[in-house]
Image: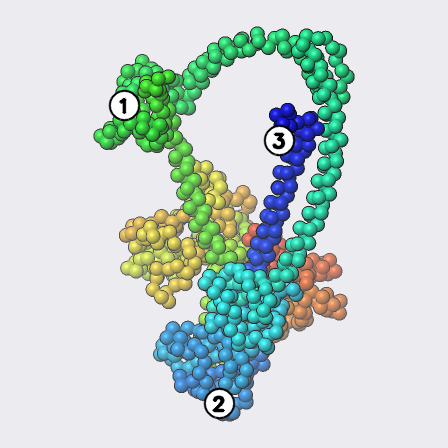
């Protein structure tokens, strides 16, 4: 049956096998590639669905957060505490007209006192709303799932905020929201071929982009609910409509709802199969073409080999035959050398055997003697040294004459010799076939080094142990480098963790600062109006406005600190004279520290210049000094010192993101309580504080950390319990000339004017506030909601002195608008306003050169001062 195999295949058969052996792996690889493509495409779709769900969850959280801020602002109204519910109803109705949100107020008996859904005086029901018990227990806001409202008589969800009196929940202030609001948010975000929805904490449908009315309030499929153990993930199964789908889900952090996005499995499989069919057809066509080309080439090669075989057979029999003219040049060369190769073969074989033996021995000796990075030496069966290479002499420090015949235990430490480690090492090598370890070893003179040791047993031809081969390598530097690498990796991980905490900050800063602009601006206007009123009730209302204004300003400061920590605060970098900066800072810092604290400022005449944001640097120094004051409740001394330092490569290798070079070191020291290592490891984390509740936000050092890192610097804290604390800030040296007039610049005493200002702001409430504020200051104001309307207004008004524009606008942004305006009106001045802008006018965290910027939230005072400064400059 296998005679053909014993007789051998014809040449064409072998060529066919070669072609098949090439094509089969290629085809198998293609199948594996298609399989992996299919798997990766499914994984990509699942990841895309999960990312879509995560983005929707963030969108829902931002919407809920904005509504929660509105409700919390109203919960501190004095009208509630004065039981003036009718006046509070009018106030709530205005908010409802503005926001479209229904506001309710209930007492502890669940009796509705106010419901903006119906006119004042309408009898209101007693309504038990989910989450009241939790609000009473935690005194914190609560976001409900879906339920049927007592007045609306349709599915709703609510946001409830407690109204506290004497730290007890006295009332429930509540937003009653339509579920269609959630559906609109989903429809505005997802792609048309996908379905999205929201499931509340009770696993009931709250929103769905398809058949919403049919499924609202119904329970989600059990197979989907079983997957909701984690905050986000994937799911494949049958949806509520009985359709097989793939879905990604994520959980809302604020409300605890699950948001999901799904796509029908038939859509996924259809697109993937089409791609696979196209690739498969192309692969088959290429395979057929490859077989055809291989057949042509193999035919020519077979004919040439047949001719060469016939010639070789004739030469082997001693027959002379002319060399055929073969198509392949290489086969022609082989044909010419066959006769000479046959005659010389036996002579060369004998000579090569002898030469190989001699060269092998010589190479081994050269190798052993030439190695200097490894100590290679031999031991007898008892462990005495029998030979010694130059590498051993270099590493161990002994010459060959000093160690031959001595026991190798002289290289071990006293501790290892007491534990009989040398003997155990030889025993392990004998029984296990090899011994390998790392540990401390001794050089001549008793100096230690960290070594990698390998011991192998050596046997003769009869299997008798005749000694050991020992190799030792000095890896002290490698061990130290690994230790430094691990330390740097840990520090980089800590830095990345701290940076990740700040990623969310920039995302909400713009909208939040717009909201604060409206709140602070209108509270400021209300305060100015009330200052002229003298009655008791009006005075109490003025105090309430003051308290609300203080709270809003604290929220503005908190947002600024978070942006600084996240390295997203626009920095106005300028060259600074450090000594002058410290002199100026100490003037207003001394009163702030109090009489019990002594302030000492030390500088030298040759301190280098730096480039930094003056206001942010002063804030950082003040924060550190006040922290030092708080660490010394009984008084003490705070020292601020400036000096020049050079951070070398050895120092920078221990800290991620620090580059070698010249730095100015600003040190703020106190003699206070100090900190433990556990506290030092967390001091730069946002909201971490060791102070009592209410005494600090935990953002002071976080703001310092973010500002210094954004400025290209480095910050380090040295502290021990009861030994005080020193914070060292390292800022890169700048060779630019410091602005001599920067510290002494003053603003015009006038804060009003008669110039014409074009205000461009897409947020209507912010635009109204800014415009009304400017009109109070006697300016002529032209309003525009985007770049298109602004350019049209510019054509209609010849005399425009200043363009005041938000940076983030729909369509063209503020920077692009300013470029177009300046091309049309070269003399016009531009002032940007923003709550958060990363790329338009701020790059690498630094404000572009020549750009004037005012940060939101705005007040009348800050707006008036900045506008006057821009208008009066270079007149």
Point out the tag, 1 or 3, that comes first from the N-terminus. 3
Q: Residue at x 46, y 44 (%)?
A: 656
Q: Residue at x 51, y 54 (%)?
A: 567
Label 2 belongs to which residue? 124
Q: Could you say where residue 737 lies in the image, as x and y percent from the top left?
A: 55, 46
Tell me, for residue 510, which label it has, or none. none
Tell me, for residue 1, which label it has, or none. 3
Q: Is residue 56 left or right of residue 111?
A: right
Point out the tag, 3 or 2, that comes first from the N-terminus. 3
Q: Residues within 10 Å of mark 2 (few under 14, many from 20)?
A: some
Q: How far apart are the two marked residues, 1 and 3, measured between alpha carbons?
A: 72 Å
Asked which secondary structure carries label 2, the reply is: loop
Does residue 589 sit above or below 203 in this rendering? above
Q: Is residue 439 left or right of residue 305?
A: left
Q: Residue at x 38, y 54 (%)?
A: 682
Q: How far apart are the two marked residues, 3 and 2, measured between alpha carbons?
A: 100 Å
Q: Nearer the viewer, residue 691 or 751?
A: 691
Q: Is residue 322 left or right of residue 588?
A: right
Residues under numbered marks 3 and 2 in contact, where contact means CB atoms less than 8 Å apart: no
Label 1 belongs to which residue? 410
Asked which secondary structure carries label 3, the reply is: loop
Q: Residue at x 56, y 78 (%)?
A: 178
Residue 457 quadrant: top left
Which quadrant of the figure contains the N terminus? Answer: top right
**Is residue 548 in sight in this rendering?**
no
**Is residue 850 in sight in this rendering?**
yes
Q: Could you say where residue 767 lies in the image, as x and y percent from the top left?
A: 62, 71
Q: Of discs 2 and 1, which sits in the foreground?
A: 1
The tally of labels here is 3
Residue 17 quadrant: top right
Q: Of discs 1 and 3, which sits in the foreground?
A: 3
Q: Nearer the viewer, residue 829 or 771?
A: 771
């Amino acid at each position: 049956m296998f005679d053909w195999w014993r007789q051998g295949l014809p040449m064409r058969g072998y060529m066919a096998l070669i072609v098949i052996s090439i094509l089969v792996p290629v085809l198998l690889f293609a199948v594996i590639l298609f399989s992996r493509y299919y798997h990766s495409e499914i994984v990509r779709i699942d990841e895309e669905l999960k990312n879509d769900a995560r983005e929707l969850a963030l969108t829902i959280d931002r919407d809920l957060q904005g509504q929660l801020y509105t409700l919390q602002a109203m919960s501190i109204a004095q009208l509630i505490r004065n039981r003036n519910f009718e006046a509070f109803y009018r106030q709530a109705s205005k908010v409802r007209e503005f926001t479209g949100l229904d506001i309710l107020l209930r007492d502890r008996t669940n009796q509705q006192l106010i419901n903006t859904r119906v006119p004042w005086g309408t009898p209101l029901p007693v309504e038990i709303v989910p989450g009241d018990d939790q609000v009473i227990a935690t005194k914190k806001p609560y976001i409900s799932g879906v339920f049927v409202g007592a007045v609306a008589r349709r599915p709703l969800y609510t946001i409830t905020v407690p109204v506290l009196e004497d730290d007890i929940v006295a009332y429930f202030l509540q937003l009653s929201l339509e579920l269609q609001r959630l559906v609109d948010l989903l429809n505005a975000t997802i792609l048309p071929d996908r379905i999205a929805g929201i499931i509340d904490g009770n696993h009931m449908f709250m929103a769905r982009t398809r058949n919403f009315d049919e499924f609202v309030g119904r329970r989600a499929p059990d197979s989907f609910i079983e997957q909701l153990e984690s905050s986000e993930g994937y799911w494949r199964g049958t949806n509520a409509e009985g359709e097989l789908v793939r879905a990604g889900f994520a959980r809302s952090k604020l409300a605890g709802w699950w948001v999901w996005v799904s796509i029908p499995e038939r859509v996924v499989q259809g697109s993937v199969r089409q791609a696979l069919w196209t690739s498969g057809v192309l692969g088959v066509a290429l395979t057929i073409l490859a077989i055809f080309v291989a057949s042509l080439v193999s035919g020519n090669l077979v004919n040439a080999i047949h001719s060469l075989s016939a010639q070789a057979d004739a030469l082997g029999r001693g027959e002379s035959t002319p060399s055929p003219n073969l198509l392949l040049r290489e086969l022609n060369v082989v044909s010419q050398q066959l006769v000479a190769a046959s005659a010389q073969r036996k002579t060369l074989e004998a000579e090569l055997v002898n030469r190989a033996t001699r060269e092998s021995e010589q190479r081994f000796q050269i190798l052993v003697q030439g190695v200097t990075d490894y100590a290679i030496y031999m031991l007898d069966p008892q462990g005495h040294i029998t030979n010694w290479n130059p590498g051993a002499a270099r590493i161990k420090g002994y010459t060959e004459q000093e160690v031959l015949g001595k026991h190798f235990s002289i290289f071990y430490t006293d501790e290892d010799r007491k534990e009989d480690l040398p003997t155990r090492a030889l025993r392990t090598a004998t029984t296990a076939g090899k011994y390998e370890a790392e540990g401390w070893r001794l050089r001549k003179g008793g100096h230690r080094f960290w070594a990698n040791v390998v011991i192998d047993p050596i046997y003769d031809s009869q299997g008798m142990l005749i000694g050991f081969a020992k190799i030792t390598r000095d890896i002290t530097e490698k061990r130290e480098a690994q230790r430094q690498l691990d330390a740097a990796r840990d520090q980089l991980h800590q830095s990345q963790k701290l940076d990740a905490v700040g990623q969310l900050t920039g995302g909400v800063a713009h909208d939040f600062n717009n909201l604060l602009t409206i709140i602070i601006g209108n509270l400021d206007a209300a305060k100015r109006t009330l200052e002229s009123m003298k009655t008791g009730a009006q005075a109490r209302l003025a105090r309430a406005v003051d308290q609300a204004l203080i709270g809003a300003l604290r929220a503005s400061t908190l947002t600024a600190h978070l942006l600084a920590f996240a390295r997203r605060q626009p920095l106005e970098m300028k060259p600074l004279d450090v000594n002058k900066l410290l002199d100026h800072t100490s003037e207003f810092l001394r009163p702030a520290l109090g009489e019990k604290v002594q302030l000492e400022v030390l500088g030298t005449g040759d301190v280098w210049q730096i480039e930094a944001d003056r206001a942010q640097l002063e804030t950082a120094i003040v924060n550190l000094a006040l922290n030092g004051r708080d660490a010394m409740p009984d008084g003490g001394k705070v020292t601020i010192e400036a000096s020049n330092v050079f951070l070398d490569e050895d120092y920078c290798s221990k800290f991620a993101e620090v580059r070698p070079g010249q730095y100015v070191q600003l040190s703020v020291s106190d003699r206070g309580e100090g900190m433990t290592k556990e506290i030092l490891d967390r001091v730069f984390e946002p909201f971490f504080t060791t102070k009592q509740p209410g005494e600090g936000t935990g953002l002071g050092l976080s703001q310092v950390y973010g500002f210094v890192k954004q400025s290209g610097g480095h910050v380090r804290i040295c502290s021990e319990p009861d030994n005080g604390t020193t914070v060292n800030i390292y800022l890169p040296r700048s060779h630019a000339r410091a602005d001599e007039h920067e510290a002494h610049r003053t603003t015009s005493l006038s804060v009003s004017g008669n110039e014409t200002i074009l205000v461009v702001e897409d947020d209507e409430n912010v635009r109204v506030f800014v415009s009304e504020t400017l009109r109070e200051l006697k300016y002529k104001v032209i309003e525009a909601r985007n770049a298109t309307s602004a350019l049209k207004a510019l054509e209609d008004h010849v005399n425009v002195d200043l363009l005041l524009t938000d940076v983030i606008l729909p369509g063209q942004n503020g920077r692009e608008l300013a470029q177009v305006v300046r091309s049309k009106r070269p003399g016009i001045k531009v002032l940007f306003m923003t709550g958060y802008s990363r790329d338009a006018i701020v790059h690498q965290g630094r404000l572009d050169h020549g750009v004037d910027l005012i940060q939101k939230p705005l007040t009348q005072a800050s707006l008036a001062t900045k506008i006057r400064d821009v208008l009066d400059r270079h007149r």
